[in-house]
Amino acid sequence: MSNENPTSSPATESVSNTEKVSPFLTEPLPQGAPQGQQQSLQQQLTDASTNTQVPKYNLPRGANTGNVGEVTHFGYKSVRAEDKAQKVAEVFHSVASKYDVMNDLMSFGIHRLWKRFAINMSGVRRGQHVLDIAGGTGDLAKVFSREVGPTGHVVLSDINESMLNVGRDRLLDAGCTNVDFVLANAETLEPFADNSFDLLTISFGLRNVTDKDAALQAMYRVLKPGGRLLILEFSKPVFEPFSKLYDLYSFTALPLMGKLVANDSESYKYLAESIRMHPDQRTLKTMMENAGFQNCDYHNLTGGIVAVHRGFKL
Ligand SMILES: C[S@@+](CC[C@H](N)C(=O)[O-])C[C@H]1O[C@@H](n2cnc3c(N)ncnc32)[C@H](O)[C@@H]1O
């Protein structure tokens, strides 16, 4: 592993509440506020009304590869590519506190089975190093923490401080002492050194990322040779009549539930739209191959509503 021990960096301070120094941090967290600092939301906000160039949320830097044109999609809306991460941040800041309950309600609890399926495909073993990207409230990281045991190590990372805070509180309450919590943009995975992890997971995160090709390349970079990547994500239902019913449910029931439970219908409208804009099973598999992953395959779950893609760095 090529990383150093950054004992005096802000990144190290960011995980000091667990009294552990992550061996995976190579430099201070880029731009994003370090975890553990009790920064109020008000402090994070800048006055977007007086200067539209000033970002509302202080986010870890993106990749700026040119892979994405000037305009991209945010759900069905066209937005400037550079603005998308901010808009996604608004969604997840808004829903963070109700995220887990909404997940259970919207999927009738089935998201737990999807995640269980992905975990079973991970082949995770004791002593391994695992990175859960866009890990949010930590469903996967919590299980991996137990599976890798005290000799292993899990990093729960996310671009969004609100989501990561919920995940950190939850995992620390559950006694997960082998987990670090790191703000990172999936497009760069900047805090992590090359060839660091045995296993990478990204669950319902990739569709929110502006530059997915950059993210896949970053994932390839931080994965150890022999390691595997699992992508759990909404995908394209394989049976057309089922697809129509699913559309009806997504575009009517989801925003309504969002309104009633989280007082936010727009975020759940975005959820439904972003699912439709995400690459289908075959396209995503090709994107993984283009990023260098080998032996890529995918498994459809619930008729292709969700798919788990798997790839290896050999
Ligand atoms: C639908 S949630 C999924 C959370 C968790 N992985 C799960 O399966 O329950 C999507 C997560 O992706 C995160 N996210 C969005 N864009 C990201 C990016 N560019 N880099 C890292 N995380 C990102 C959001 O902050 C949010 O926590």
Image: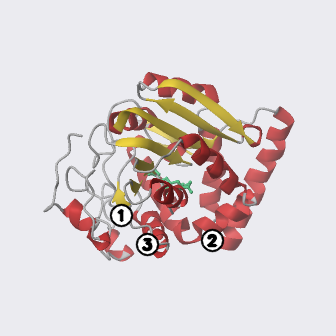
Seen in the picture, residue 293 relative to 247 is either above or below; the reply is above
Asked if the residue at tag 2 contacts the one at tag 3, i.e. Cβ–Cβ closer than 8 Å, the answer is no
User: Is label 3 or label 2 in front?
Assistant: 3
Question: Which residue matches tag 1?
Answer: 48
* Residue at 37% across, 49% down: 185
Q: Residues within 10 Å of mark 1 (few under 14, many from 20)?
A: few
The numbered mark, 2 or 1, whose residue comes first in the sequence reads: 1
* Residue at 30% across, 49% down: 61
Question: Which residue matches tag 3?
Answer: 172
Percent from the top left, x then y, of residue 135?
Answer: 48, 55
Percent from the top left, x then y, of residue 105?
Answer: 72, 64
Q: Please state which of residues 63 and 173 is positioned toward the viewer in this rendering.
A: 173
* Residue at 80% across, 49% down: 248
Seen in the picture, residue 212 relative to 168 is either above or below; the reply is above
Q: Can residue 209 be seen in this view?
A: no
User: Is label 3 or label 1 in front?
Assistant: 3
Q: Please state which of residues 153 and 157 is positioned toward the viewer in this rendering.
A: 153
Q: Report helix, strand or loop for mark 1.
A: loop
Structural distance between the alpha carbons of marks 3 and 1: 34 Å
Percent from the top left, x then y, of residue 51?
Answer: 31, 60
